[in-house]
Image: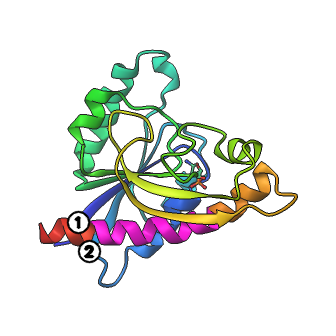
Amino acid sequence: MSLRVAILISGGGSNMVTLVDSMTGDHPARPCLVLSNRPEAGGLDKARARGIPVAVVDHRPFGKDRKGFEVELQAALEAAKPDVICLAGFMRVLTAEFVTRWQGRMLNIHPSLLPKYKGLDTHARALAAGDAEAGCSVHLVTPELDDGPVLGQTSVAIAPGDTADSLAARVLVEEHRLYPEVLRQFCENLRQS
Ligand code: GRF
């Protein structure tokens, strides 16, 4: 029996597409849901085009009521019954209570070499610090933002004249390689456990 993977997005969904396209053949998992907190997220149509069920839980009507938003998010997830959740460009910070419920089964991709540069604007911060390399990390999600155990990482050399955008574009290529690789290994381990 294949494991079921739900993917949470907020934007274009390029990481989501690489995850979905990787779950074929002898892969131990299959996508069961793509969910966005923004109805206008471009990734939703890419998921529909691949025949993946989609759902939207718009966070805006909830304002600062994170728990209210998460009650609906949890209901949508429970309906899809995922074994694993992948955050892929999902830009909502989840409460400790919600994360704890899925702990050990929720992954995230972050565009830095964690533990460096948790949070936003990772490439601009690496450039401002004069770093020689940047990169991306896939980690388990824990209540502390971008703090969970790192399951995989790829570094990317910073080139003279790099801007945050040019660096982000090169790191994104590595994200598309790293996330499917880590998800596959994670699911194989989960299935053997
Ligand atoms: C990626 O760079 C990811 O690391 C970050 O947000 C971006 C999302 O890109 N959290 P996409 O929506 O997967 O194209």
Residue placed at 39% from the left, 56% from the top? 53
Residue at the spot of label 1: 3
User: In which quadrant is the C terminus drawn?
Assistant: bottom left
Q: Is residue 104 above or below residue 101?
A: below
Task: Tell me if mark 1 has few (under 14), some (14-19) or many (20+) residues whose alpha carbon lies within 10 angstroms of its own.
Answer: some
Residue 179 covered by magenta stretch: yes
Q: Which residues are magenta?
A: 172-186
Residue shown at the point (19%, 65%) measured from the top left:
190
The answer to whether the residue labelled 1 contacts the one labelled 2, judged by CB atoms less than 8 Å apart, is yes
From the image, tell me which residue sits under label 2.
28
Counting residues from the start of the chain, the first of labels 1 and 2 encountered is 1
Give the x, y percent position of residue 78: 23, 43
Residue in view at x 53 percent, y 48 percent:
89
Quadrant of the rendered image containing residue 52: bottom left
The secondary element bearing badge 2 is classed as loop
Q: Residue furthest bottom?
A: 25
Instruction: Calculate the distance from the C-alpha at mark 1 to the C-alpha at mark 2.
Output: 6 Å
Nearest the camera: 110 or 50? 110
Q: Magenta segment: does it hold 89?
A: no
Amino acid residing under circle 1: Leu
Whether residue 172 sits left or right of residue 124 in the image: it is left
- Does residue 1 appear in the picture of this structure? yes
Badge 2: few (under 14), some or many (20 or more) residues near its Cα, within 10 Å?
Answer: many
Q: Position of residue 148 (x, y in %)?
A: 36, 45
Secondary structure of the residue carrying numbered label 1: strand
